[in-house]
Every structure is written in structure tokens, then in C-alpha cells.
Image: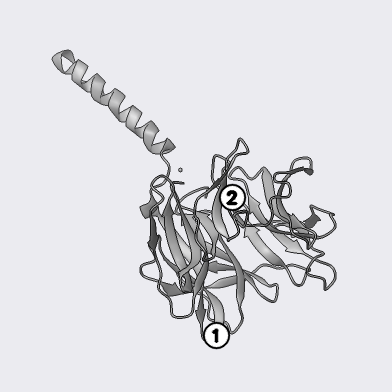
């Protein structure tokens, strides 16, 4: 998921106090998490029969169409700073799209059919899912270095390894692994030595990973019979956030980490909603005619 001239004599204590206060406030400003007002929202919504990328403010207002291709967009993620979006089309192509102008730059790759592409927190690497054959249950997680153009295979595990998600420090890559049976668990890979750890074991399906700065994982899971939103805390405890017969999926952390924006069918069509973690209050953000999904939140000025 960023100085004063001291006065003499009687004015000295006042000036000194003001100086200390200014330095304290400056430090707080540097350490303060970005406010929700500094964030932007991107998501996919139907337009002319295709899933296309849209951008809006964090509350869903002022929505604007970003991609106009007659081709589905399958995945989007924000570059650091919130000025550009990584767009992964259904045919596997990758583009870097300027949100203000709509101008795009193709990201060159020699691997056709890239899926689940997400940019790293430092904007230098792209993690993605890729399979060398036509089976949808034989993918591994790969990484592309933006500067060199080199590709690296990170997993070599039987079954489907997909939906990578970066830790906030960029040191870990979380992903989903399944063999096509009843379990689809969370794993993580340490990029420094390529060691892997299994995070969940046989807890039915997990999808749509999103990591907060403190390591808390938000995801969609069906342990209670429906696809609801869950949290997995750094200590390993799991907590259900929603309990609805409708689909709740694709959670994305807000800029301050206090709420989740997610897709849901709880009022019929697929649209975006916002969940306050503390109060559990839920509010609808979009009312689209043909559906909206896959929200991602950017923080302007972060990690540039």
C-alpha cells in the first residue's frame, strides 16, 4: 500500500517553542499516511460489450473511460505516484497508460499470453502468471524486470500458480496455488532467496489478494459457504468481514488502510462498494448499467 531564526531577549522562549513545534509538525507530516483525498480509484466496467479501464475519485465520482479498445482488459494496477496505470489486456499485451492524457506505451515482452500482471511498489518489476501450454491449470508465477527486459520464472510447481500480489516493501510476492480440486491456498515467495512458504492449508478457496502495509491480507474466500471478504492478520488469525449470500470479491485497501473497496452483487448487478473495517458499515460507490469490478486504489506522490 512521502526550517527558523531565533529572536533575542524576552521573545526567545516563544520563538524557541515555535521552532520546536514547527520541527515536530514537519516530522509528523513526513511520517503521516496519505489521506483518502489524495487517492484515486481505477476499476473495470462494461462499455460496448467489453471490460474497459475507468478512473474516478476514491468515492467513485467523476468516472472517466481510460481504454477504448474493443478488447477486454483483464487486470490493472497503479504505478507509484498514481499518474500511470499498468493495463493487461485479455490477449496478454501490457501497456503503461498515462491517466491524464490517455497516452500509452507498450511494454515489450517476448512472452505472449501474460496474465494477472501487477506492478511492484517501486515501479521497476512486474509480476504475472504464465503457462507454456494451453492448460489453464498449469501456470507459474514470473517476474519481468522493466529496465533490462529480462524474465525470471519464480515458481515451478504443479497446478495453477496465479494472482500475484506484492508486499508493501517489495520483498515478498504472495500468490495463489491450486491443483484444480477443492482447495486453493495462499503462498508467498521471498524474492531475495526464492524461498517459499505456504500461508494457508486446505481452507477451501482463496482469491483476490490485497496486502496492507502491516502485512494484513484481505481476500475473498468461501469458508462459510459464500464468497465473502476475509482478513488474515500477520499473526495468522483469519477473520470474516462480510457474511452475505451475494458475491463479495476483489478487495482493495484504501490509502489509509482503514477501509476496503470491493466488488459485490449484493443488490443484483456487480458494482463497487466500500467497507469500513472498524464499524463494518458498507456503502455503495457505483451504479453501472452492466457491471463494475476489480477496484485498485492509488496514492498520489507515494514511492515516486
Q: Are there few (<14), some (14-19), or many (20+) residues within 10 Å of tag 1?
A: few
Q: Residue at x 67, y 64 (%)?
A: 116
The one of 242 and 301 positioned closer to us in this rendering: 242
Q: Is residue 115 above or below residue 188?
A: below
Name which quarter of the figure residue 273 lies in.
bottom left
Query: Disc number at residue 181?
Result: none
The one of 225 and 257 positioned closer to us in this rendering: 225
Residue at numbered disc 1: 49
Q: Are there few (<14), some (14-19), or many (20+) residues within 10 Å of tag 2?
A: many
Q: Secondary structure at mark 2?
A: loop
The one of 78 and 220 positioned closer to us in this rendering: 220
Name which quarter of the figure residue 216 lies in.
top right
- Rounded to the nearest angstrom, the CA distance separating label 2 from label 1 is 32 Å
x and y percentages locating residue 13 in the rendered image: 20, 16
Marks 2 and 1, the one that precedes in the sequence: 1
Residue at numbered disc 2: 121
Query: Decide: marks 2, 1 in contact (CB < 8 A)?
Result: no
Q: Residue at x 39, y 65 (%)?
A: 285
State how the image is colored: one colour
Q: Secondary structure at mark 1?
A: loop
59 on left or right of 93: left
Name which quarter of the figure residue 64 lies in.
bottom left
The one of 290 and 238 positioned closer to us in this rendering: 238
Amino acid at each position: 500500500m512521502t526550517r527558523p531564526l531565533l529572536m533575542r531577549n524576552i521573545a526567545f522562549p516563544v520563538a524557541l517553542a515555535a521552532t520546536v513545534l514547527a520541527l515536530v509538525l514537519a516530522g509528523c507530516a513526513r511520517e503521516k499516511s496519505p489521506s483518502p483525498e489524495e487517492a484515486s480509484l481505477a476499476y473495470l466496467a462494461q462499455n460496448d460489450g467489453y471490460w474497459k479501464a475507468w478512473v474516478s475519485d476514491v468515492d467513485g465520482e467523476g468516472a472517466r473511460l481510460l481504454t477504448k479498445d474493443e478488447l477486454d482488459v483483464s487486470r490493472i494496477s497503479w504505478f507509484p505516484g498514481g499518474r500511470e496505470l499498468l493495463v493487461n489486456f485479455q490477449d496478454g499485451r501490457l501497456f503503461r497508460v498515462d491517466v491524464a492524457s490517455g497516452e500509452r506505451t507498450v511494454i515489450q515482452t517476448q512472452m505472449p499470453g501474460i496474465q494477472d500482471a501487477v506492478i511492484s511498489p517501486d515501479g521497476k518489476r512486474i509480476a504475472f502468471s504464465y503457462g507454456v501450454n494451453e492448460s489453464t491449470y498449469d501456470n507459474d508465477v514470473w517476474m519481468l524486470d522493466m529496465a533490462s527486459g529480462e524474465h525470471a520464472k519464480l515458481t515451478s510447481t504443479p497446478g495453477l500458480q496465479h494472482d500475484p500480489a506484492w508486499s508493501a516493501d517489495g520483498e515478498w510476492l504472495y500468490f495463489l496455488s491450486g491443483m484444480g480440486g477443492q482447495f486453493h491456498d495462499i503462498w508467498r515467495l521471498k524474492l531475495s532467496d526464492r524461498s517459499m512458504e505456504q500461508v494457508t492449508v486446505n481452507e477451501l478457496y482463496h482469491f483476490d489478494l490485497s496486502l496492507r502495509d502491516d502485512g494484513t491480507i484481505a481476500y475473498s474466500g468461501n469458508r462459510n459457504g459464500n464468497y465473502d471478504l476475509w482478513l488474515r492478520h500477520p499473526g495468522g488469525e483469519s477473520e470474516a468481514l462480510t457474511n452475505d449470500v451475494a458475491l463479495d470479491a476483489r478487495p482493495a485497501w484504501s490509502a489509509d488502510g482503514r477501509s476496503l473497496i470491493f466488488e459485490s452483487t449484493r443488490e443484483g448487478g456487480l458494482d463497487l462498494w466500500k467497507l469500513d473495517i472498524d464499524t463494518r458499515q458498507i456503502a455503495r460507490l457505483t451504479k453501472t448499467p452492466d457491471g463494475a469490478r476489480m477496484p485498485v486504489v492509488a496514492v498520489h506522490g507515494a514511492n515516486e
